[in-house]
């Protein structure tokens, strides 16, 4: 018995050697960048169309999902020369304007579109109101870049013009979000009808950033209106923290007559994805909010026990939520990447804040990577123990990357999921969002500034 325990210990210990070496990471980054671009404006789709994956059967993902497309386009930030980037984003703007005005079953919350530009009219969970918010967030960044380059004409023509009814892409989405954020809708996994934390978090961020853009573009009443709606959403978000569970629940209210009704735990990794997708260090529910960190802990704890593959290798593959049955319910690349990215973004915020805080709510989160006794209190960046904690956090982030590497094909191929028992890839092949999530993770990895930047992706 003792021998077996010792053997298991050694196995776990030895296999925890980091695989996430810089060469692999760089190669994977180049591969992901190529794959993402290959999935935009393909020969058999409309210009600007982003396919969710190249697979046309089991499952058929040859559609433009509003959510995936917005996140995929955003993942290109910092990776392309301006001339190339602006062309890609202008194409994307054209398809957004088209999707907003084309005939469809619901309004701007319509989730997906066919390659010929028509809306998908089959049975589906709709509306999905994270879509317009994510789309606005991506285009707001583009509009700001255009303004920095002195191109206010394009912004005024296509992206944001102070007029109602709105005819420009960002303004339409912001008006929709501001007027409909209290409506019931389906979650980002397209399964549950209710009021979702992820959706509200991205809606608040879109309105806040939209208000800033409106202010810049001489639309002060709209700016004030969007700000006031963002403040209302902020207040509603407080209700998602469940003190007795020690995590942020994913859905409140709801309508079980449509969609799933077996998601009993109400625990969902999308809470962490929301925090990294909005990347808003000053607002509530940022990556360093103790409630986000406590939820992170719960998810890691849950998935490390739930998936047998997590007992085989070091690091933890993360899935959508414990009760998931889609393809049997497995860890996903994009979520596992998101967890690494969340840690790296925390490091960045702690550095810029000049310290970190451990309290009763996030104490368990710190126990994920600190083996010593953890004391409640603040650690300032002058304190020598600060760097020690940061170093542990970064190594911990690498364990998620290492897990992703383990399940990635030698070619660099990443599908949607990896099997919870065998570890082999399952679900949509070459999922565009898997690659996009790798790009944003890699950027966070480099952006901490303390990693040796021997990759040179900025100059490529
Ligand atoms: C397709 C959706 O995209 C996926 O998220 C969901 O799990 C399955 N349908 C099953 O409802
Ligand atoms: C299923 C995922 O649950 C959903 O979030 C995504 O939009 C679609 N697949 C397309 O990738």
Image (spheres, rainbow, N blue to C red):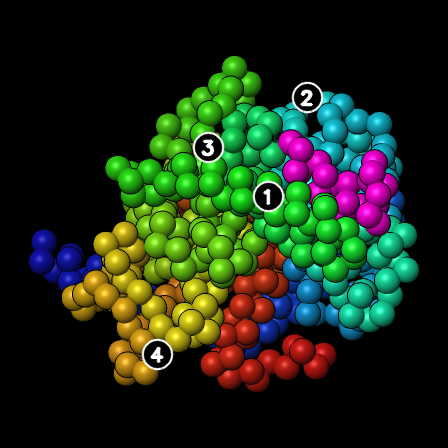
Considering depth in this image, is 254 or 161 the residue closer to the camera? 161
Q: Residue furthest top?
A: 257
Mark 2: C-beta under 8 Å from nearest atom of ligand 1: no
Considering depth in this image, is 414 or 231 the residue closer to the camera? 231
For discs 4 and 2, the disc positioned in front in the rendered view: 4
What kind of secondary structure does the magenta stretch mostly adopt? Answer: helix
Q: Which mark is residue 228?
A: 1
- CA separation in Å, label 1 and label 2: 35 Å
Q: Residues within 10 Å of mark 2 (few under 14, many from 20)?
A: few
Q: Which mark is residue 381?
A: 4
**Mark 3 falls on what kind of element?**
strand
Which residue does the image show at 43% across and 64% down from the upper left? 346
Instruction: Mark 4 or mark 1: name the one nearer the start of the chain.
Output: 1
Which residue does the image show at 27% across and 62% down from the upper left? 358
**Residue 177 within the segment the image draws in magenta:** yes
Does 245 sit above or below residue 363? above
- CA separation in Å, label 4 and label 2: 53 Å
Q: Which mark is residue 251?
A: 3
Which residues lie in the magenta part?
A: 161-180
For discs 1 and 3, the disc positioned in front in the rendered view: 1
Image position of 27 (left or right of 164): left
Circle 2 is placed at which residue position? 123
Image position of 200 (left or right of 109): left
Q: Residues within 10 Å of mark 4 (few under 14, many from 20)?
A: some
Q: Position of residue 66 (x, y in %)?
A: 70, 41
User: Residue 168 sits in which quadrant?
Assistant: top right
Which residue does the image show at 66% across and 38% down from the upper left? 177
For discs 1 and 2, the disc positioned in front in the rendered view: 1
């Amino acid at each position: 018995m003792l021998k077996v325990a010792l053997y298991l210990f050694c196995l776990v210990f030895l296999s925890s050697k980091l695989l996430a070496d810089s060469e692999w990471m760089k190669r994977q980054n180049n591969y992901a960048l190529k794959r993402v671009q290959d999935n935009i404006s393909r020969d058999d789709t409309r210009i600007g169309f982003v396919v969710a994956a190249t697979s046309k059967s089991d499952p058929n993902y040859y559609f433009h999902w509003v959510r995936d497309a917005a996140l995929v386009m955003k993942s290109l930030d910092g990776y392309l020369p301006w001339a190339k980037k602006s062309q890609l984003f202008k194409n994307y703007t054209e398809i957004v304007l088209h999707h907003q005005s084309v005939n469809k079953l619901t309004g701007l919350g319509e989730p997906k579109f066919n390659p010929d530009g028509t809306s998908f009219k089959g049975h589906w969970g709709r509306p999905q109101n994270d879509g317009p918010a994510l789309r606005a967030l991506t285009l707001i960044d583009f509009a700001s870049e255009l303004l920095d380059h002195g191109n206010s004409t394009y912004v005024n023509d296509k992206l944001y013009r102070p007029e109602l009814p709105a005819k420009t892409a960002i303004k339409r989405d912001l008006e929709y979000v501001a007027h409909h954020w209290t409506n019931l809708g389906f979650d980002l996994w397209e399964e549950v009808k209710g009021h979702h934390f992820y959706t509200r978090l991205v809606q608040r961020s879109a309105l806040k950033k939209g208000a800033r853009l409106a202010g810049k573009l001489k639309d002060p009443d709209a700016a004030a209106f969007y700000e006031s709606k963002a403040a209302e959403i902020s207040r509603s978000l407080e209700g998602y923290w469940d003190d007795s569970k020690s995590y942020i629940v994913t859905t409140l209210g709801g309508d079980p007559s449509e969609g799933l009704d077996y998601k009993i735990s109400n625990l969902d990794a999308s809470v962490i994805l929301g925090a990294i997708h909005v990347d808003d260090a000053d607002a509530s529910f940022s990556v360093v909010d103790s409630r986000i960190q406590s939820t992170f802990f719960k998810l890691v704890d849950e998935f490390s026990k739930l998936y047998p593959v997590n007992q085989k290798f070091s690091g933890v593959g993360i899935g959508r939520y414990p009760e998931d049955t889609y393809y049997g319910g497995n860890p996903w690349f994009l979520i596992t990447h998101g967890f690494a990215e969340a840690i790296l973004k925390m490091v960045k915020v702690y550095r810029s804040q000049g310290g970190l805080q451990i309290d009763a709510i996030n104490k368990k989160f710190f126990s994920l990577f600190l083996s010593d006794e953890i004391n409640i209190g603040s650690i300032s960046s002058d304190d020598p123990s600060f760097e020690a904690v940061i170093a542990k956090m970064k190594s911990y982030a690498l364990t998620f990357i290492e897990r992703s590497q383990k399940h990635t094909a030698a070619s660099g191929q990443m599908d949607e999921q990896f099997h919870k028992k065998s570890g082999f890839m399952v679900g949509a092949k070459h999922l565009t969002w898997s690659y996009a999530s790798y790009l944003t993770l890699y950027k966070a990895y480099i952006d901490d500034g303390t990693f040796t930047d021997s990759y040179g992706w900025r100059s490529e």
